[in-house]
Amino acid sequence: MTFADILETITDAGTSTGTAIKQGASNIQKYDRNDILAAIGLEPKRTTTQVVLPAVGFFAVGILAGVGLGLLFAPKPGYELREDLSEQMKVAVKKGQGAMNQARETVETSPIV
C-alpha cells in the first residue's frame, strides 16, 4: 500500500463521515426541545404561570365551597339572609357601574395618541 492509497482511503473516510454528520444534523433539526426531552424520559420545566394558576383556581373553588357552606349553616333565617344578600348585591352593582362610568369618562376625555 502506497502513501497515495492511504491518503485516498483517509480522504474517502473523511468525506463519508462528513456526509453522515451532515445527514444526522439535518435529522436532528426536525426535533424540538420537547421531543428530545420526551425521548429521554423528561419533561420541560413548568413556568411560574403554569404552577400558580391551578393553585389559585383550587383556592377560589375552596373559597366558594366555604361561602356556600357558610350560607347553608348561617344563623339567620332564609328570608333575612336573602334580603341582606340582595342589599349587598345592589351596593356592589352600584359600585361597579360607578367604576365603569369613571373609566368611560377617562377614556373619552383622554387625548388620542
Image (cartoon, rainbow, N blue to C red):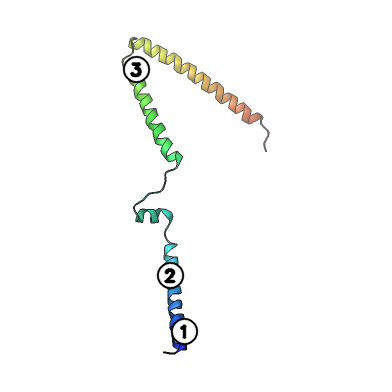
Q: Residue 103 at what x, y percent from top left?
A: 59, 27
Query: Alpha-carbon neighbours of circle 2 within 10 Å: few (<14), some, or many (≥20)?
Result: few
Q: Nearer the viewer, mark 3 or mark 1?
A: 1
Q: Nearer the viewer, mark 1 or mark 2?
A: 1
Residue holding disc 2: 23
Residue holding disc 3: 70
Residue holding disc 1: 7
Taking the view exactly as shown, the residue that stands out farthest to the left is 73
Q: How many marks?
A: 3
Q: Residue at x 43, y 74 (%)?
A: 17
Amino acid type, callout 2:
Gln
Q: Residue 64 at what x, y percent from top left?
A: 37, 24
Q: Residue at x 39, y 29 (%)?
A: 59
**Helix, strand or loop status at disc 2:** helix
Q: Residue 22 at what x, y percent from top left?
A: 45, 70
Foreground residue among 7 and 47: 7
Of mark 1 and mark 2, the one earlier in the sequence is 1
Q: Residue at x 43, y 70 (%)?
A: 23
Task: Calculate the distance from the C-alpha at mark 3 to the C-alpha at mark 1.
Answer: 88 Å
Amino acid type, callout 1:
Leu
Q: Residue 88 at what x, y percent from top left?
A: 45, 15
Task: Calculate the distance from the C-alpha at mark 1 to the C-alpha at mark 2.
Answer: 24 Å
Q: Nearer the viewer, mark 2 or mark 3?
A: 2
Task: Calculate the distance from the C-alpha at mark 2 to the C-alpha at mark 3.
Answer: 67 Å
* Residue 13 drawn above or below residue 32: below
Foreground residue among 89 and 64: 64
Quadrant containing the C terminus is: top right
**Helix, strand or loop status at disc 1:** helix
Q: Residue at x 45, y 39 (%)?
A: 49
Query: Alpha-carbon neighbours of circle 1 within 10 Å: few (<14), some, or many (≥20)?
Result: few
